[in-house]
Amino acid sequence: MKMVVIADDFTGANDTGVQLAKKGAHTEVMLSARQKPSRHADVLVINTESRAFDAATAAQAVTEALTPWRQADLLIYKKIDSTFRGNIGAEIEAALRASGKRLALVAAAIPGAGRTTLNGECLVHQTPLAQTEFASDPRTPIVASRIKEILAQQSRLPVTEVTLSTVRSGELSALLRHCQRQAPAAVVVADAITERDLALITDAALALEEPPLLVGAAGLAAALPASACVAARQSLPVLAIAGSMSEATRRQVELAIRNRRAQAVEVDAALLLNHDRRDIDRLAQQASALIAAGQHCILRTSRSMNDRHQIDALCQQFHCGRAELGERLSQLLGELTLAIMERARIGGLFLTGGDIAIAVAQALNAQGYRIQQEVAPCIPCGRFINSELDDLPVITKAGGFGSESALCDALSFIEEMYRDH
């Protein structure tokens, strides 16, 4: 993850988040600080819904939202209303404390919407804020146009106003660095009347060794470069679950191994059916080690045709019929898949065999499967819906389907998806 945004209302969270999504960032808006982002989020937007709170409660909400991210090397963005409604001073102070940053840089202009900052004042279509309808807002009325005065209602932090000429002079980074060193915590309010001004402000902020707390609305977010919010895409290994005993699946696995496209972790069905947690942990550790080393990994339950002749013996050993045996083995492979995902980051799943596919879906709490593409005839690629796998690709294949290269083709298909993004 590259960036955390703290917003004080839901629509504001979305209108800022969309500016980052447009740059290619995987942007996720959380409705509360208790929710967890997916493993591949670039930007986490947390809505504290605190605009109409009293100042102390709003500050506490911001603190709780940011505290888990204090030690992370992330850009922190405090989203505020462009007309300064809400608990601006209290929430900026709380965000500074919670993030450990020493400087907040406020640039709330949205030039395209007629919101600008000039000589430290917030203007709406060139009219001072306190002379607009926002002064009589029913929930959070505005009593001043000068941003410094609005902040002073809830904060005693020193505020430096940066004029438009300074923003455009090329000296803003030096000024920010100076302010950063002068006090334990401080605020800088920057003038901006065009999108270019906002771009100069973000460039100056990101040039600092320690970027400040960015405070703004959608305009400042839109001015950020993609590098500030989009993590470098990394092609992650695929986990393949080959639970089918079909000859087609065995040939597909053998070709992938022979061509060094993947490595296998051999799963002894009898050991797995003993349901010893230590065996599941051992297999999960083997697989996650391969994945951590960047290798595609195949969990293989069958290596030869002779394995079919062991089914009756396994049924006698575990006192069950063939159907129950298959169901229990599939369920255990689903648990093993989840155990691997808890230890390693994967780029997608390849599931062969209908029983295996549904068992893995259930283990990952999937509520459905959204089909998106076709890898090869009758071999779809899609996403599990609302699952532990986030939004990563899942390829399913009936055990007896596919050419000998089907597994290799599937691995290449997912690799190409990462290259395209």
Image (cartoon, rainbow, N blue to C red):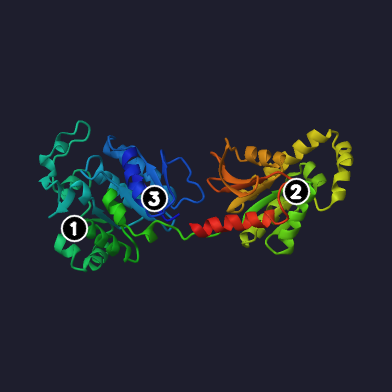
Q: Position of residue 363 (x, y in %)?
A: 64, 39
Residue that label 3 marks: 21
Residue that label 1 marks: 160
Looking at numbered disc 1 in the image, what kind of residue is underneath it?
Thr
126 vs 9: above or below: below
How many marks are shown on the rendered structure?
Answer: 3
In the rendered structure, the answer to whether residue 88 lies left or right of residue 47 reads left
Q: Nearer the viewer, mark 3 or mark 2?
A: 3
Looking at numbered disc 2 in the image, what kind of residue is underneath it?
Asp
Q: Position of residue 156 (x, y in %)?
A: 21, 49
The local secondary structure at tag 3 comes to helix
Disc nearer the start of the sequence (2/1): 1
**How many other residues sit within 10 Å of disc 2, few (<14), some (14-19) or many (≥20)?**
some
Which labelled disc corresponds to residue 420? none
Quarter where residue 272 is shown: top right
Which labelled disc corresponds to residue 279? 2
Q: Position of residue 287 (x, y in %)?
A: 68, 55
Looking at numbered disc 3 in the image, what kind of residue is underneath it?
Ala
